[in-house]
Image: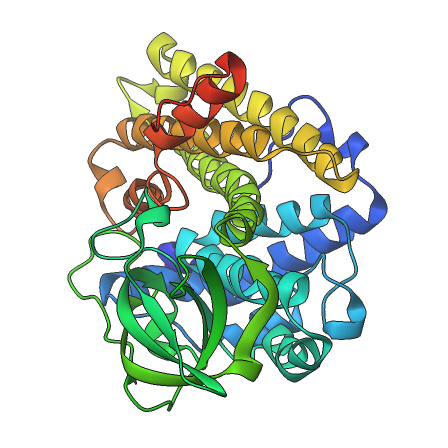
Amino acid sequence: MSQKAKEDRYQAHDYYNVDALLSDEHKMARDAVRDWVKKEVSPIIEDYANRHECPVYLMKGLGEIGAFGPSLPAKYGGGGMDETAYGIIMQELERGDSGIRSMASVQGSLVMYPIYRYGSEEQRMKYLPKLATGELIGCFGLTEPNHGSDPGSMETRVVDDGDAYILNGAKMWITNSPVADIAVVWARREDGRIIGVIVEKGMEGFSAPEIHGKWSLRASVTGELVFDNVRVPKENVLPEALGLKAPLSCLSKARYGIAWGALGAAMDCYDSALRYSQERIQFGKPIGQFQLTQKKLAEMITDITKAQLLVWRLGALADAGKASAAQISMAKRDVVDMALRIAREARQIHGGMGITGEYPIMRHMMNLESVVTYEGTHDIHLLITGMDITGFNAFK
């Protein structure tokens, strides 16, 4: 890898002075994470993505900068900050790489949050402080091989066996699973109700094979969860989680972070494209002087500005406890869609260099092809918005 690829020259762009809407705490959190990404992620991420390997060692660093559960109470190792701060942190992490943000999103929103929201006090004290520091790594098991967008049809089952449940089934496309110490798993009880259980590494019959051959999120580790008569003590059941509403609430928390995160990827692509347009000389002048290049860049910064205002308002609603699942769906879908468009336009501005690891464009573009699908696909989020505005359920 060339020295140029290791140099992170990123500068944030804020055309409408959205910074004025942020508190000093928000800016401090953002700057701390941005500095960490420049120092720890940018120099190594292209190499790890090329090798299809996850820099798991970064989990400890993510814990040190408060990226795990930043909006959860400090009593449990969280940051005690608001939801806007959580979003800003996700934005800066995904500016570095979607896979790194995915690792943090899963740990905070899909593992720590359900334990905090639906777990017992004993479970909170046992798991959350160690998850917050990265001493423990967690994953979230909802998606199955045969059931992605339709989790209500899950086939994973638990059968009552006195002081434990016997767990059988499989989960698919699980971020962190091969390296996770615990898994928050959703399964159907004999009465048909869905419950959440905490499965620990080492439990007999539990395995988490890695998924290989990904062309996207190559610096994030993804796998399966396989349960073959796993005996899960009832003390590991989340006592307040009953029904599909519980895991869906966790997904809303994660989708919120994704909306902010995808904006970070878009901003990185735009920043690289703008700088390249000012430095690349063709026909005797910088390509940024050509009208068609200016059109691309002007549309990029316009879309980014609209997304900055969208997620800021969503954050304000979330801070007030008023952000609906449908509003979060709209933001997740629209910002990811926008980020994909910007990545593709940025690739064109970079010309042939845009497909190389000298620049982050192709890596972001490939990553975003996963982000547009996970935590609810583009089409599913459109239907969620459609149901919210019409009152008609297109899923039935």
The answer to whether residue 311 is above or below residue 183 is: above
The quarter of the picture where the C terminus appears is: top left
Residue 393 in sight here: yes
Q: How is the image coloured?
A: rainbow
Residue 376 found in image quarter: top left
Residue farthest to the right, as pictured:
24
Q: Nearer the viewer, residue 254 or 194?
A: 194
Q: Is residue 148 left or right of residue 65?
A: left
Name the residue located 42 percent from the left edge and 51 percent from the top edge.
98
Name the residue located 34 percent from the left edge and 62 percent from the top edge.
174
Residue farthest to the top, as pictured:
291
* Position of residue 275 measured from the top left corner of the image (x, y, whole percent): 45, 34
Residue 39 found in image quarter: bottom right
* Position of residue 33 measured from the top left corner of the image (x, y, whole percent): 63, 58
Q: Nearer the viewer, residue 229 or 357?
A: 229
Residue 67 in sight here: no
* Position of residue 289 measured from the top left corner of the image (x, y, whole percent): 41, 15
The quarter of the picture where the N terminus appears is: bottom left
The answer to whether residue 70 is above or below residue 168 is: above
* Position of residue 179 measured from the top left corner of the image (x, y, whole percent): 37, 78
Name the residue located 38 percent from the left edge and 54 percent from the top edge.
4
The answer to whether residue 15 is above or below residue 41 is: above
Q: Is residue 315 left or right of residue 23?
A: left
How many badges with numbers are in the image? 0
The answer to whether residue 134 is above or below residue 357 is: below
Q: Nearer the viewer, residue 341 or 73?
A: 73
Name the residue located 68 percent from the left edge and 74 percent from the top edge.
120
Q: Is residue 279 left or right of residue 206?
A: right
Residue 126 found in image quarter: bottom right
